[in-house]
Amino acid sequence: MPTHLLTMLPAFLAYFLVALALLAVFLLVYVNITPYHEFELIRAGNLAAAISLGGALLGFAMPVANVIAHSDTLLDLASWGGIAGAIQILAYLVSRVALPQLNDDIPAGKTAPAVFLAVLSVSVGLINAACMTY
């Protein structure tokens, strides 16, 4: 293995572990904000829950990945990751206003609202990622 790869390995591991921690914290917050239990629904085969949660995770992961590519410190990553998570939570709350029955539709397995929520989350995440290029 080339020497420069070995010297960069600690930085890679640090950024990767912080990103995984951010993802875990986001997931924990997100599933506690929604009134339904995504993991139980997904285990039961509820495609709507999988679609909506998957979109939220992608919407969060895109800005985090962008920050990793452009940040100078782990503090930058953690700070912008927190902002990305807050924006994704806001996107979910806005979707509840746009689709008042969303909290009943996802547990009922209705995929149309789940797809809308996933696309909204990914779209917001993409815009969020673009705004975090500095």
Image (cartoon, rainbow, N blue to C red):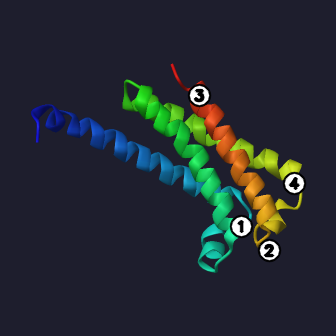
Of callouts 3 and 4, the N-terminal one? 4
Mark 1 residue crowding within 10 angstroms, few (<14) / some (14–19) / many (20+): many
Cα separation, mark 3 vs mark 1, equals: 28 Å
Cα separation, mark 3 vs mark 2, equals: 34 Å
Q: Which residue is mark 2?
A: 108
Cα separation, mark 2 vs mark 4, equals: 14 Å
Q: How many marks?
A: 4
Judge depth for marks 1 and 4 and give the one in front: 1
Residue 130 got which mark? 3
Decide: marks 2, 1 in contact (CB < 8 A)?
yes
Q: Amino acid at mark 2?
A: Ala
| Mark 3: secondary structure | helix
- Taking depth in this image into account, of 50 and 96 the one nearest to the observer is 50
| Mark 2: secondary structure | loop
Task: Pinpoint residue 34: horizontal percent, then vertical percent.
Answer: 71, 59
Task: Pinpoint residue 101: horizontal percent, then vertical percent.
Answer: 88, 62
Q: Is residue 87 visible?
A: no
Cα separation, mark 3 vs mark 4, equals: 27 Å
Judge depth for marks 3 and 2 and give the one in front: 3
Decide: marks 3, 1 in contact (CB < 8 A)?
no
Mark 2 residue crowding within 10 angstroms, few (<14) / some (14–19) / many (20+): some
Decide: marks 1, 4 in contact (CB < 8 A)?
no
Task: Pinpoint residue 62: horizontal percent, then vertical percent.
Answer: 54, 41
